[in-house]
Amino acid sequence: MTVIGRWIGAVRGALGFLTRLPIGYRDGDWEAFRATPAAFPLVGLFAGALAAIPLLGTERLAAPTVALGYLLSVYAVTGIHHLDGIADLGDALVVHGDVERRRDVLKDTTTGVGALLAVTITVAALALAGLGLAELPVPAAIGVAVGAEVGTKFGMAAMACFGHAAYEGMGKQFTDAATAGSLFVPMAVVLSAATFVWPHPGVLALCGAVAGIGLPWYWANRYLGGINGDIFGAANEIGRVAGVHLGVILWTLS
């Protein structure tokens, strides 16, 4: 496979995994995606732009309507399968026991109270973030939404490059395929974009999303012995929420 072919395959694989867009898989796409962490923020840019379309109505529609449109658009574009990671993380957070017990809870398909609470808080937090975006000028609102999506995907790329998998599974497929040097390209892409739009609040949202990724990552390393697929999914949701809220806060205070 040529370099260009590998990149195209990686982006197709990333779109298939990170979004609900009807992108057909081809042989080798999944492997190319796992070995190309730069595909994470590239897809984040595209998905974030699509999800931000309802924010074009911030100056004409009521704020709650715009917020609902943004919430629905995010999950229409990215899907809800990453919320499964939030649900499993919620159950693991409240369980009593050692590392093995928490790992067992992550693998359990039963939905507990911790899962329900975690998903509810996450969705509510994103809806409230959308309400904050609805109060911003259109360019700022779109910039924050896109910046948060790029940031959370960049954070996932960092997890793939530097993370340690707790056990066999989805997480290990990413950590085994990516290397520390693989983060150079996505970092260059993100820093170049951030420099180009600085001091746009979208840059601050991007930084907030990356910081938000660190929360589940740190917890997983400490209490699970490493990351797994659920942590990738949870980090995606937490990073987005953290990024949008920080972008809205800093814009409001400026």
Image (spheres, rainbow, N blue to C red):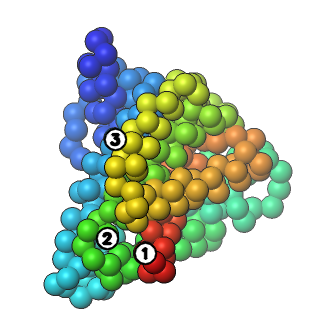
| Amino acid bearing label 3 | Leu
Q: Mark 2 or mark 1, which has the lower sequence index?
A: 2
Q: Is residue 45 above or below residue 212?
A: above
Secondary structure beneath dot 1 equals helix
Residue flagged by tag 2: what amino acid is it?
Ala
For image coordinates 51% across by 32% down, the residue present is 183
**Residue 214: x and y, percent?**
62, 52
Question: Can you say which quadrant of the picture contains the N terminus?
Answer: top left
Viewer-nearest of discs 3 and 2: 2
Q: Residues within 10 Å of mark 2 (few under 14, many from 20)?
A: many
Q: Is residue 73 above or below residue 31?
A: below
The residue pinned by badge 3 equals 42
Q: Is residue 135 left or right of residue 227?
A: left
Q: Which mark is residue 141?
A: 2
Residue 196 visible in this rendered orientation of the protein:
yes
Q: Earlier in the sequence, mark 3 or mark 1?
A: 3
Residue 134 locus on image (x, y percent): 31, 79
Residue lying at the far top in this picture: please name it: 1
Category of crowding for the residue at label 3, using alpha-carbon neighbours closer than 10 angstroms: few (below 14), some (14–19), many (at least 20): many
Q: Residue at x 32, y 20 (%)?
A: 6
Please state if 39 lies on the left or on the right of 212 as rendered.
left
Q: Tell me the element at label 2.
A: helix
Q: Position of residue 23 (x, y in %)?
A: 22, 38
Kindly check if marks 2 and 1 are in contact, taking CB atoms under 8 A apart as contact: no
- The one nearer the camera, 98 or 35, is 35
